[in-house]
Amino acid sequence: MSIKMVGLVSAVALGLGMMAHGAMAQVAAPPTPPIVLPQDVAFEGTMTVAVDATDLNQRVIKIQQTVPAKPGPLVLMLPKWLPGKHHPANGNIQRIAGLVITANGQPVKWKRDAVDMNAFHVEVPAGAGELKVAFQYLAPTVASTARIVLTNDMLNLQWEFASLYPAGYYASRIPITASITLPEGWGYATALETAGKTGNTVQFKTTDYETFIDSPLFSGRYFKTYDIDPDGPVPARLNVMADKPTQVEASEDIVAIHRKMMDQAYKLFGAPHYDHYDFLISATDWLGDIGLEHHQSTEIGMEPKWLTDWKNEYVGRDVLTHELVHSWNGKFRRPADMWTPNYQVPMRGSLLWVYEGQTQYWGHILAARSGLYSKDQELEYLAIMAAGLDNLPGRQWRDLADTTNDPALSARAAQTWRAWQRSEEYYTEGYLIWLDADTLIREKTNGKKSLDDFAKAFFGVNPGSRTPVTYTFDDIVTGLNNVYAYDWATFLNDRLHSAGPGAPLDGITRGGYKLVYTDTPTAYYKATETLRKNVNLAYSLGIAINSKDALISAVQWDSPAFKAGMAPNATLIAVNGKAYDAEILKTAITAAKTGTDPIELLVKVDDNYRTFKVDYHGGLRYPKLERIEGRKPLLDDILAEKK
C-alpha cells in the first residue's frame, strides 16, 4: 500500500470514529517543565570545562564539565542566541552527541525540553554537590553539512558548542575555569588569559561565562603573532594561522599599516573598552569563512594569500576594521533590544542599521584612513555598493527597517531572487545613511563638525569600561543633535522607511561625486569577480555566471534576462550560436549596441535545452564614481587620515 493510501485509510478511519463517537473534545498537549528565567544573582561555585581537540582524523571534539549543583531540578543549556549572529544558533545542538551526566559516580537521567531543544532537564540526586557532564561535538568534515571548524592544520573553537550552562542566572554571574588540549606543537590565541600550560594542555584563568563565550580560540600548526600596537594604551595583537607556513609571514610595511589602523581607531573613538585586543585570523582554503565580533577579539577568515600577495588580495580587508569597530559599537554600546542576560533569551534587531550599518561605515572609513584600502579602492567599493542598492527592485515593496528581521527570518540561507526578496541591506544601505548624515553635518557646519564628533562622544563614554551601555533610537537622535541640531528623527525615519526605485545617494552627491556607468570595470570590480570566481553582468544583461562551470548563479529581477524568462541555476552553453566563454558574451553585448537583434543565449536547465532571446542594447555597464565639478569633495576629506 502506498504512503498516500495509508494516509487516506487513516483519514477515513478517523472520520468513521468521529461519527461513531460524536464530536471529540480538543485536548491540550501537556505542559513542558519550566525553564527558570535568568536572575541577576551569583551562581554558587565555579564550573569547569576541559576540551580535547586533538582528533584531527575524525574531528570529534571531546568535552568534560563539572557543574556545581544542589539536589532538585536543574536545566542545562547549550547557548542559543549569540551576540553577533543575530539569529538563534540551532545548528550546534544537532552535532552534540554522547551526552552523559553523572553525580557521585552514578548516572543521572536527562530529558530534552520538548520546545527548547538546546535545554536538558535533570534531577540532581540527594547528597550530590555537583554534576559531571561529558559529551562530544561532532565537528563537520565537509562544508556542505556546516561550517568547518577543525582541519588537519587549524582549529576555530567557539566555546558555545563546547559547554553547557545552568538556567536561572545571568551569564555574567556564572564563574568558569576552562582548559584545552591542543595537537602537538600548535600555537594558539584567545582573549582569555592563560593561567599555565602543561604539555599540550592550556589552562585559562577563571572568568565569567559571558566573557568565556565571547572569547573564542584560534589554534594552528602554522601560527604567528604580531604586535600591532606597541605604544598604545593596551596590547593589541594580530594572530594569524594558515594552511602553509609561508602564509603567516607579514612584511614590516604590512604590520605598519595595521598599527596605523589601531591609531586611527583611537583617534576616532577615543579610549578602548577592552584590556587587550586579539585579531584571530585564518588564511585558508579549508577552514570555514567567518567574520564575527567579540569585545576583546574577533574571528576573521581571509584568503590564503592576503599577506603574501598584498597588492592583489585586497578585497575584504575592511572586515578587520569592521570587527574592531564592533568593540565600541555592538559590544560596549549595544542596542537595547539586543542585550540579553543569557543565551536563551531572544534578541531583536530593530537597530541593526546602527549596530551593523554604522559599523560598516566606520569600518570602511578606517580601512581608507589607515591604508588597508587606498582612497581609489574605497571609492570603487562605494560605487559597487551604491549601484547594487540603486538597482535593487526589492526596495519597491520592502523598506530597510524590515530587513533587520532577516537574520531571524532566514538565518542567511541562500535566496533564489535576492534582489527582489532583499537580505540584510542594513549593512550597505546603512553605510549610505551614515554617509548622508556625515556629509550633511560637514556641509551645514562648514567642516567644523562631522560624524567623527558623534562617534567619539557616543562610543567613547566610560573609557576603559567593559560593562555594556545600551542605546535606543532616541539616544541616537539625541547624540546627533548634540553634534548638530537638526530634525534627525525625521531624517532617519525617512530613510528607514523609504521606497524605491533608486537608493539614497545624497551622501555621495553631497560628498562631491556621482554614480555613473562605463563599459570598463574598475580594478575593485575585477578583483571582486576574481574573488567570487564569477562574471558579473548585473547592470547590463542582469546575470552573473560562475567562471568555472558557466552556471548562471544569479538573475537580476526585472533585468533584460529576467524579462526574457531566464532564472538562476541554469548552465550557459552558447551565445549567438557560439560556445560560451566570457569574452564571447561581452563581445555580443557590445555588438548589440549598434543592432536590433536580441542576444540569443542557449542554456541547459536540468536535462532540457532552451534558447532565450534577450532584447538588450545598452552595452556593458560597470559602476564607478565620478567627480562633480565645482562641488567640494567632502568624501575625500572623510577618507583622509585623521591627524
Image (cartoon, rainbow, N blue to C red):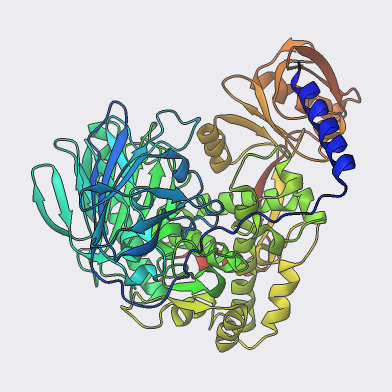
Q: Is residue 402 left or right of residue 526?
A: right
Q: Write down the quadrant of residue 140 in the picture.
A: top left
What is the x, y in percent for residue 15? 86, 37
Q: Is residue 63 visible?
A: yes
Viewport quadrant of the C terminus: bottom left
What is the x, y in percent for residue 177? 21, 60
**Which of the pair 499/309 is nearer the observer?**
499
What is the x, y in percent for residue 593? 83, 30
Q: Is residue 207 left or right of residue 511?
A: left
Residue at 31% of width from left, 68% of height from top? 174
**Which of the pair 505/28 is nearer the observer?**
28
Q: Write down the quadrant of residue 305 in the picture.
A: top left
Residue at 68% of width from left, 61% of height from top? 628
Residue at 23% of width from left, 65% of height from top? 46
In the rendered image of this protein, does residue 302 appear above or below residue 634?
above
**Which of the pair 65/388 is nearer the observer?**
65
Residue at 57% of width from left, 50% of height from top? 381
